Image: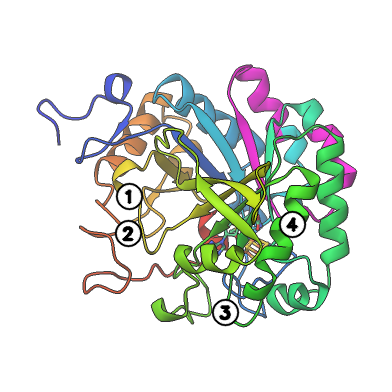
Amino acid sequence: MPAGGLNPAADGLLDRYGRRATDLRISLIDKCNLRCTYCMPEAGLPWLRREQLLSAEEIRRLVRIGVEVLGVRELRLTGGEPLVRKDLEEIIGGIRADHPELPIALTTNAIGLERRAEALVAAGLDRVNISLDTIHRESFAELTRRDSLDKVLRGVEGAAAAGLTPLKINAVLMRGLNDQGAADLLAWSLQHGYELRFIEQMPLDADQQWKREATVTAAEVRQLLSDHYELTPTDEDRGSAPAERFDVRRRGEQAVLGRVGIIASVTEPFCSACTRTRVTAEGRVMSCLFSTEETDLSALLRDESATDADIAHRWAEAMWVKPAAHGTDRPGFELPGFTRPQRSMSAIGG
Ligand code: SAM
Ligand code: SF4
């Protein structure tokens, strides 16, 4: 604890290692309509009851405290699948009314997005990251356990038509499942002007099948793309951005076709530059994806005697003890000391 104790109004969401969290990710719901094998089990999970989920008003208040007291500078809404929430437009509209300048992004699988994209933009949404791991129907169905590729593609088109650009596509590769389709996914993204980012798979699958040696690494992703494309690292400063970005050229040609990002969460962790604070759908702060500790804010939000300052203080305390890396004192999912969180990515909020 700093001398004199925590002072959230002055220090924001500072931790013991000097990192300050300014990037807030709120999970709106744990449910999802896909069952991606790297995330959810086939049968789903025991879902939270409706009254356990933070309400639109509670989320709005949390964001207000985050921005006005704790120095939050950007917001991402995620899940589970945030589009499963019928009040998503209301949630975004309320936050936007309070914070005209706050960048608000959504991470989604895009199912049904074409029907809601315009309303979401009107409510104040700025950008979307859409998860799409392959453009091959069979691999998509195998990977997500649902034959829903067409629905996702319609959602992507709807988002682009509504102006949710630059549109980012997130892809996780799994060996033998969709890895051989990586170059096709890149070709499709370049053709539409979307920025594709490959994310190394982390041990956050509810089935607990993750193995370090099965992870398709950033180096392998570059290799998989190299038959068709030449990747040149961009010279931009990465700051706290997890993705290393590359200019993409077709082999032997000069023209830059677009960019691709690779997020090496496993092989080149970026924990020392982390600026994230996460709140789960039931209102618990997780200072790290791999935290084994969670700090409940919902009880305070529902206690009429608790002030914004009380909530800010509890939140700041939770962040002060943020682990150095991967939930422990050093990065490395394969090292002794690493404990898998009990929650899956869907139950934390990716
Ligand atoms: N349902 C939405 C979606 O899929 O975009 C939002 C929630 S999902 C948990 C957020 C992101 O987490 C997705 O891009 C997904 O690919 C990623 N993700 C899920 N499980 C993961 C894992 N084990 N390793 C790496 N990324 C994962
Ligand atoms: Fe659902 Fe997203 Fe998890 Fe896939 S990654 S199961 S779309 S929450």
Magenta region: which residues? Answer: 91-120
Of badges 3 and 1, the one in the foreground is 3
Q: Earlier in the sequence, mark 1 or mark 4?
A: 4
Q: Which residue is mark 3?
A: 175
- Discs 1, 4 touching: Cβ within 8 Å: no
* Badge count: 4
Marks 3/1: CA distance? 25 Å
Marks 1/4: CA distance? 31 Å
Q: Is residue 8 above or below residue 156?
A: above
Answer few, some or many: residues within 10 Å of disc 2's Cα (few below 14, many 20 plus, some between 14 and 19): many
Q: Name the one closer to the observer, 283 or 95.
A: 95
Label 1 lies in ligand 1 vicinity (Cβ under 8 Å): no
Q: Is residue 96 magenta?
A: yes
Of badges 2 and 1, the one in the foreground is 1
Marks 2/1: CA distance? 7 Å
Q: Name the one closer to the observer, 157 or 227.
A: 227
Residue 8, image x, y percentages: 30, 26
Q: Is residue 297 above or below residue 52?
A: above
Residue 55, image x, y percentages: 63, 41
Residue 287, image x, y percentages: 36, 48
Q: Is residue 276 visible?
A: yes
Mark 3 residue element: loop
Mark 4 residue element: helix
Residue type highlighted by circle 2: His
Q: Earlier in the sequence, mark 2 or mark 3?
A: 3
Residue 25, image x, y percentages: 52, 42
Residue type highlighted by circle 4: Ala
Marks 2/4: CA distance? 33 Å
Q: Which residue is mark 4?
A: 187
- Discs 2, 1 touching: Cβ within 8 Å: yes
Colour setting: rainbow
